[in-house]
Image (cartoon, rainbow, N blue to C red):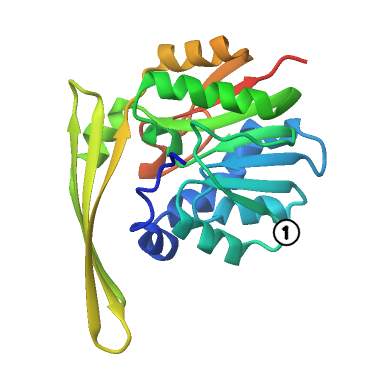
């Protein structure tokens, strides 16, 4: 099965030390964008759900949650966080589910990990097929500004149980960003384990994204700036757009 497994070595670091700033704001942003349009107890698919932090919040609000992710390690954290949600090991480009959902969400620039416009179009087609008529697809993507201003930096983090160094770069010609991470993780009392891995993202162009959505069958497509349009603050709002599209009823 083809799946995006690059986050397997990253899962522990992400679940324990990364993503807090985004997830503190994620529910409020989604409520402004999408949730107020849904019925109580709506069925939501969390595509590229990661460690399940947002899935857990939505589950706590009464939504019926299903999560998909390509990383087995991420899903271990997600299953530990959530009591009722169903989690499926799968890939955004190839998944198929028998149920129908009122909405599909994909957050924290997860779909920037789809590395070609053609594969992004396949994601849109897959999402369309699992939505009920009138269902919504909500997701966010990094714009080029996020890569030139934020990704192309070196960042170090030191905690009692880990030391990490992240070296980012952005290839403007290929619209591709890279982040090489070296992680030292404390195991036991005095044993440190080193791991090295690379995360890659593609900077999708808005026109191509909207065309992929229309080709898949979506309408009522809107794009909002995360900061100016939805009130997301800090670095995570910089250079980020949220998209909302609807499957016609």
Residue 183 drawn above or below residue 66: below
Residue 7 drawn above or below residue 3: below
Q: In x, y percent, where is residue 66?
A: 66, 46
Q: Give the mark count.
A: 1
The quadrant of the picture occupied by the C terminus is top right
Front residue of this view, candidates 101 and 27 = 101
Work out which residue is located at the far right of the displayed protein and give it: 40
Front residue of this view, candidates 225 and 23 = 23
Q: In x, y percent, where is residue 91?
A: 49, 39
Q: Quadrant of residue 119?
A: top left
Give the secondary structure at mark 1: loop
Determine whether, in the image, residue 178 is placed left or right of residue 221: left
Work out which residue is located at the far bottom of the displayed protein and give it: 189
Q: In x, y percent, where is residue 213?
A: 54, 16
Determine whether, in the image, residue 177 is placed left or right of residue 31: left
How packed mark 1 is, by other alpha carbons closer than 10 Å (few <14, some 14-19, many 20 or more), is few
Q: Quadrant of residue 187?
A: bottom left
Residue occupying the point 29% across, 78% down: 186
Q: What residue does disc 1 label?
A: 84
Residue occupying the point 53% across, 32% down: 139
Does residue 106 appear in the picture of this structure? yes
Residue occupying the point 74% across, 30% down: 37
Residue occupying the point 82% across, 41% down: 40
Determine whether, in the image, residue 245 is placed left or right of residue 141: right
Q: In x, y percent, where is residue 113?
A: 38, 36
Does residue 159 appear in the picture of this structure? no
Front residue of this view, candidates 216 and 246 = 216
């Amino acid at each position: 099965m083809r799946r995006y497994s690059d986050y397997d070595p990253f899962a522990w670091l992400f679940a324990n030390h990364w993503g807090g700033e985004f997830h503190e704001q994620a529910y409020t942003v989604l409520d402004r964008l999408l949730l107020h349009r849904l019925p109580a107890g709506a069925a939501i698919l969390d595509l590229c759900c990661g460690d399940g932090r947002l899935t857990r919040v939505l589950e706590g609000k009464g939504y019926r949650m299903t999560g998909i992710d390509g990383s087995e390690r991420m899903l271990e954290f997600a299953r530990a966080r959530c009591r009722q949600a169903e989690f499926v090991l799968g890939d955004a480009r190839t998944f198929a589910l028998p149920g129908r959902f009122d909405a599909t969400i994909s957050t924290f620039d997860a779909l920037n990990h789809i590395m070609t416009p053609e594969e992004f179009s396949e994601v849109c087609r897959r999402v369309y097929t699992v939505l009920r008529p009138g269902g919504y697809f909500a997701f966010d993507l990094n714009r080029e500004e996020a890569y030139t201003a934020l990704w192309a930096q070196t960042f170090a983090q030191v905690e009692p149980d880990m030391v990490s160094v992240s070296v980012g770069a952005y290839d403007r010609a290929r619209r591709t960003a890279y982040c090489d991470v070296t992680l030292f993780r404390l195991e036991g009392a005095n044993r440190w384990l080193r791991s090295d891995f690379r995360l890659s993202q593609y900077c999708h162009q808005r026109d191509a994204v909207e065309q992929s959505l229309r080709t898949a069958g979506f309408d009522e497509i809107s794009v909002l700036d995360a900061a100016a349009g939805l009130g997301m603050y800090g670095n995570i709002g910089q250079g980020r757009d949220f998209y909302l599209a609807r499957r016609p009823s």
